[in-house]
Image (tube, rainbow, N blue to C red):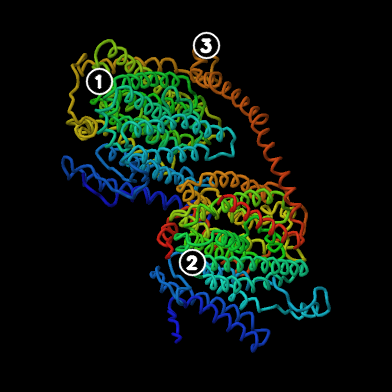
């Protein structure tokens, strides 16, 4: 006889609400008139996220529950990451809603009559909002999923909308569509690895749940080869999403091609969700086999930091530069995977939150620097921006300093607490390389600062547009968080400490 | 110990006011100075209330503390941001807020034509806040914050008119000289922490009996270095004369009455350290004695009225420092002289400011003469300050300075004779140069151009001068009657209740001697300056050397600045050729690597997929080899 599974709706509410909001958005697309859609969609998206956060707040004390027949684990890390994603998505929606960044009509061929007509009619694709919400729902599920099937479903739910969103840029559409296709092809490729890895792990342990795998490893029952292949293949899927070397190749192209608000959203929220899932899998399922996988994660962490840091130096495009910077950050974050202790976990949670704000803010500023044909991402044309618009340049500088981990910005505390955790469990090598590459990355961040402030502006048509109120609020929030968490980190660090637990 | 909850307002009020005035900018131009003055007055009111409430308590309950927050907590090292108001600090708090308020009032008129008056008042408030923190901190570290704060305020105010390069240079000079002293203080704090594991006054005091003499001497020497920097004592005295570039009220408040006395406060506060190390005490005596003569000598040759007063300040603080070196009984006399000096020197500076105000900012005394007739109030208040500083009874300086000279003689032996003799000689020179200032400025024949129209200053300026003059008359008598101040300070500086040593000379003899030498000094000055040429005569070698501040700047320049610059050039060269070479090499290598990495990023999905596959294979191989 089949027993209906028990679903604890309260615990799943944040995910379900976001899914509901997305569906509502699809309905709006179907029935509302073109003109009023944007405002309604924005309201729905923001409202949905607020409501989801409210429901998450109600369960923030319950940090040791499982839901949906043990396939979802609601624990400290899960709740912290879900909360971070909801807040950052809210800010991302502010950026998305604001600018005319998205294709007038995605189905029109670039350069065609149809496209021109759509642009002239002042159209703008509003499917972006439900797509974002779908992606967010996947991101909420991914870090709390505690069995392999749910993990895979969440991975796909978050990835598929992103493939589409990457292709929706209003200008330079070919580049954008190329990015989307690349992202899709390579994403599908990595998903296949993930699924294959899941199959091997099931073959090894006879269990789909993470703690089932952990106990199988502890019992040391079965064929090691299956386990090792499983670990490697599953890692490939995860490392692809967080953009670790050598599975990072898509990152610069996609970050450059995608509409900038979407790039910000991907760089912040996707990385957080994927990192959350990675931490859970390695801390919960794979930790008994740490001696097997630690060398490869260590190698990847070092490669990622070095390649990300070094390759960023030669970049001439600000979005590509930030893409490589995000790769380097992924390397730093892998140090937390190696740490395998509470303080590493705390550091990672803090790092993810602060990194998210800084990243969103930085990409937000990029949307403002334009000439007549849209955003200007060529760094050579950013020269002397500090003299033209000191406020914008100063805020961008703040974000860069935080990326570089300069004290009094959140980035410093984040790196410090992350590396402390890794050092405590004896991962000296990764800490040393991390600090050295931090110095390399500081070079190219500071080079941009020099370009902004200490070089005379060229007579160029580059201007900083006056941002709308929503963008202003979003950038201001990101900047304030970056400073406040740099000056008074304990505000969030203590919370991260409380939430730094997994249930097994 | 009593706990109090409103000590913090003493610091918070002026600090907030300064922040408001600075942040509001020009909006506050119309009323900013009133706010600042009102705030200063209210801190004085709080100080007065605190004083009377302290008097109403008795014994150990007199000192009040307030714990604000835990500032540093690292392992066993804990520093609380706490305030301590005891019998010693209340003296300073009353002086700072009282004189400070008078000078705020004076400045309203004095600075009325200045475009940046609001900023000036903001800095004044900042100074008051920092100075109060300095005297209220209950640990060396808290004191250090205030110490640096007054340094900042002093820098900002000396360079207030920094559109004149010379003034900006003067501000920098003060800053650098103070930096040397500040290193002394930070080293002292480190020594205290290393020796006693605590940086609070109470903690260090507790640890002193168990510490080695060498450590205490080192601690004392570093504290003395700090004091020398802040109080313009030998060998860090050179900045004070140039500091007169600041507006005159600043010279009166910061560079006469309060900030420059911080060194005296520091040594008095650390009495337990100096009492335990005779070597440190002797160093203090030497520094004090040298400076009091140095300053007095420099004062004899200055034609700039403010610089003459500055030299005098240096010399008078030399007396105070000397007194602090004389053991438990000396501290109280140092503080007494500090307080009376606060009145008469601030009063005279304000008088000088008043003269300059009437004379189109002319500072050369050779161009003054006969100003007493046109500025009677200024002349009288300045004259009362003059009588006080040269030590004519019953004016304030008579009591305080005589006590120091007397105590110096009484330390006994040849040391007592030398130090006492120096103090006595200082008194004679003081009488000479101060008489010179009076004669050149207020009496004799008029030597100013017809374009100058000296006039008495407005009421806002002369009222503070009159109040300070009253202080110059009465304060010494009040402090001395029934040993009021000595007894008041006893719990802090002389807990063991040490009495004055065996008297080498009777008090009456000392007074008579002092008055005798003062009379000689006055007489010489009067005779010598019967006629005053407008252009200074060339003078003999000695005069020229004294005019050049006894070659202090030449000495610093030759011995410190030039070798220092040579060393800097050497390091810059090393940095450029050697260190930058390494850095460029590393940078170049990385840049080459970066360009190569860029080639891999060729944009083709097939290459990307291939890289992934290679990656997977590499991982599998690695994990395989690890397991083997």
- Looking at the rendered image, the disc whose residue lies closer to the viewer, 3 or 1, is 1
* CA distance for labels 3 and 1: 36 Å
Discs 3 and 1 share one subunit: yes
Question: From the viewer's perspective, is B35 left or right of A230?
Answer: left
Q: Nearer the viewer, residue B223 or B134?
A: B223
Q: Which residue is more in the foreground, B476 or B227?
A: B227
Q: Which type of secondary structure does the marked residue at label 1 adopt? A: helix
For the C terminus of chain A, the image quarter is bottom left
What kind of element bears circle 3?
Answer: helix
Considering the image in quadrants, where does the N terminus of chain A appear? Answer: bottom left
Q: Position of residue B133 (x, y in %)?
A: 36, 43
Place of residue B371 in the rendered image (x, y in percent of width and height, measured from the top left): 45, 30
> Callout 2 environment at 10 Å: few (<14), some (14 to 19), or many (20+)?
many
Rendering coords of residue B578 (x, y %): 66, 29
**Mark 1 on the same chain as mark 2:** no
- Closer to the camera, B321 or A434? A434
User: Pointer 3: residues within 10 angstroms few (<14), some, or many (20+)?
Assistant: few
Pinpoint the chain carrying mark 3: B
Camera-side residue of A289 and B18:
A289
**Residue receiving disc 1:** B407
Q: Residue at x 33, y 22 (%)?
A: B214
Q: Are marks 3 and 2 in contact (CB under 8 Å)?
A: no
Q: Nearer the viewer, mark 1 or mark 2?
A: 2
Residue indicated by mark 2? A210
Name the chain letter of the residue that bears numbered label 2: A
């Amino acid at each position: 006889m089949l027993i209906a599974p028990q679903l604890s709706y309260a615990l799943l509410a944040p995910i379900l609400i976001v899914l509901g909001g997305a569906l509502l958005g699809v309905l709006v697309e179907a029935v509302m008139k073109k003109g009023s859609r944007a405002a309604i969609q924005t309201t729905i998206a923001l409202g949905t996220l607020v409501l989801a956060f409210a429901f998450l707040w109600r369960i923030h004390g319950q940090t040791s529950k499982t839901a949906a027949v043990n396939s979802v684990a609601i624990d400290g890390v899960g709740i912290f990451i879900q909360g971070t994603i909801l807040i950052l998505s809210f800010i991302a929606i502010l950026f998305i809603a604001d600018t005319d960044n998205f294709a007038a009509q995605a189905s029109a061929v670039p350069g065609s009559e149809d496209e021109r007509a759509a642009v002239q009619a002042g159209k703008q694709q509003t499917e972006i909002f439900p797509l974002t919400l779908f992606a967010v729902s996947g991101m909420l599920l991914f870090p709390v999923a505690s069995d392999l099937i749910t993990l895979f479903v969440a991975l796909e739910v978050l990835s598929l909308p992103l493939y589409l969103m990457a292709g929706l840029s209003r200008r330079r559409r070919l580049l954008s569509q190329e990015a989307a296709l690349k992202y899709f092809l390579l994403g599908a490729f990595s998903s296949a690895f993930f699924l294959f890895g899941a199959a091997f792990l099931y073959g090894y342990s006879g269990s789909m749940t993470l703690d089932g795998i952990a106990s199988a490893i502890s019992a040391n029952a079965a064929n090691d080869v299956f386990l090792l292949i499983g670990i490697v293949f599953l890692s490939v899927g995860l490392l692809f999403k967080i953009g670790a070397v050598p599975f990072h190749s898509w990152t610069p192209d996609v970050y450059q091609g995608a509409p900038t608000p979407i790039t910000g959203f991907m760089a912040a929220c996707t990385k957080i969700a994927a990192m959350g899932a990675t931490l859970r899998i390695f801390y919960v399922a794979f930790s008994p086999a740490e001696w097997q996988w630690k060398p490869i994660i260590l190698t990847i962490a070092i490669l990622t930091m070095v390649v990300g840091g070094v390759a960023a130096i030669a970049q001439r495009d600000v979005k590509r530069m930030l893409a490589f910077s995000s790769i380097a950050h992924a390397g730093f974050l892998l140090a937390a995977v190696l740490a395998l202790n509470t303080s590493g976990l705390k550091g990672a949670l803090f790092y993810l939150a602060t990194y998210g704000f800084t990243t969103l803010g930085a990409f937000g500023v990029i949307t403002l620097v334009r000439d007549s044909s849209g955003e200007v991402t060529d760094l050579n044309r950013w020269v002397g921006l500090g003299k033209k618009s000191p406020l914008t340049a100063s805020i961008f500088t703040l974000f860069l300093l935080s990326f570089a981990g300069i004290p009094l910005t959140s980035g410093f505390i984040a790196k410090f607490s992350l590396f402390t955790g890794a050092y405590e469990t004896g991962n000296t090598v990764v800490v040393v390389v991390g600090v050295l590459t931090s110095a390399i990355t500081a070079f190219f961040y500071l080079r941009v600062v020099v370009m902004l402030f200490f070089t005379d502006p060229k007579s160029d048509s580059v201007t900083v547009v006056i941002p709308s109120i929503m963008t202003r609020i979003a950038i201001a929030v990101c900047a304030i968080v970056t400073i406040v968490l740099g000056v008074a980190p304990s505000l969030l660090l203590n919370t991260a400490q409380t939430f730094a637990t997994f249930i097994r | 110990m009593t706990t109090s909850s409103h000590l913090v307002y003493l610091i918070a009020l002026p600090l907030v006011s300064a922040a408001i005035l600075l942040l509001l900018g020009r909006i506050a131009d119309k009323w900013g100075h009133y706010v600042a003055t009102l705030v200063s007055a209210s801190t004085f009111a709080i100080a007065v209330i605190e004083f009377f409430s302290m008097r109403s308590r008795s014994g150990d309950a007199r000192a009040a503390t307030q714990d604000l927050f835990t500032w540093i907590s690292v392992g066993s090292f804990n520093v609380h941001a706490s305030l301590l108001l005891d019998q010693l600090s209340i003296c300073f708090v009353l002086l700072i807020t009282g004189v400070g308020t008078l000078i705020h009032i004076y400045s309203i008129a004095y600075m009325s034509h200045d475009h940046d008056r609001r900023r000036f008042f903001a800095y004044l408030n900042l100074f008051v806040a920092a100075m109060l923190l300095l005297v209220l901190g209950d640990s060396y570290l808290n004191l250090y914050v205030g110490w640096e704060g007054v340094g900042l305020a002093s820098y900002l105010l000396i360079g207030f008119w920094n559109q004149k390069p010379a003034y900006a240079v003067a501000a920098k000079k003060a800053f650098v000289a103070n930096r040397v002293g500040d290193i002394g203080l930070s080293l002292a704090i480190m020594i205290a922490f290393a020796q006693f594991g605590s940086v609070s006054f109470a903690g260090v005091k507790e640890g002193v009996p168990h510490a080695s003499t060498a450590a205490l001497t080192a601690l004392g020497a570093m504290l003395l270095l700090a004091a020398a920097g802040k109080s313009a004592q030998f060998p860090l005295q050179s900045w004070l004369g140039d500091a007169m570039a600041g507006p005159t009220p600043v010279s009166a408040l910061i560079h006469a009455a309060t900030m420059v006395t911080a060194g005296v406060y520091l040594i008095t506060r650390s009495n337990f350290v100096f009492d335990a190390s005779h070597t440190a005490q002797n160093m203090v005596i030497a520094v004090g004695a040298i400076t009091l003569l140095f300053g007095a000598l420099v004062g004899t040759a200055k034609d700039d009225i403010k610089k003459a007063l500055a030299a005098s300040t240096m010399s008078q603080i030399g007396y105070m420092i000397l007194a602090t070196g004389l053991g438990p009984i000396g501290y109280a006399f140092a503080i007494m002289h500090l307080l009376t000096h606060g009145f008469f020197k601030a009063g005279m500076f304000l008088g000088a400011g008043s003269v300059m105000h009437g004379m189109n900012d002319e500072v050369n005394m050779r161009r003054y003469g006969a100003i007493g007739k046109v500025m009677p109030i200024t002349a009288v208040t300045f004259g009362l300050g003059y009588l006080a500083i040269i030590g004519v009874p019953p004016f304030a300086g008579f009591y305080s300075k005589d006590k120091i000279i007397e105590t110096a003689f009484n330390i006994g032996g040849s040391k007592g004779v030398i130090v006492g003799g120096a103090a006595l000689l200082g008194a004679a020179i003081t009488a000479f140069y101060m008489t010179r200032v009076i004669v050149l400025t207020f009496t004799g024949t008029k030597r100013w151009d017809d374009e100058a129209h000296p006039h008495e200053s407005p009421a806002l300026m002369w009222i503070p001068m009159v109040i300070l003059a009253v202080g110059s008359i009465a304060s010494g008598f009040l402090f001395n009657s029934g040993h009021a101040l000595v007894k008041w300070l006893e719990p802090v500086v002389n807990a063991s209740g040490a009495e004055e040593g065996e008297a080498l000379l009777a008090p009456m003899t000392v007074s008579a001697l002092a008055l005798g030498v003062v009379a000689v000094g006055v007489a010489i000055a009067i005779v010598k300056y019967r006629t005053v040429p407008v252009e200074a005569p060339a003078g003999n070698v000695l005069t020229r050397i004294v005019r050049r501040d006894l070659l202090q700047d030449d000495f610093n320049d030759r011995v410190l600045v030039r070798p220092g610059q040579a060393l800097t050039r050497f390091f810059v060269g090393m940095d450029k050729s050697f260190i930058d070479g390494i850095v460029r090499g590393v940078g170049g290598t990385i840049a080459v690597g970066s360009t190569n990495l860029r080639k891999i990023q060729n944009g083709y999905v097939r290459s990307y997929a291939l890289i992934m596959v290679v990656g997977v294979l590499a991982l599998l191989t690695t994990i395989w080899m690890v397991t083997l």
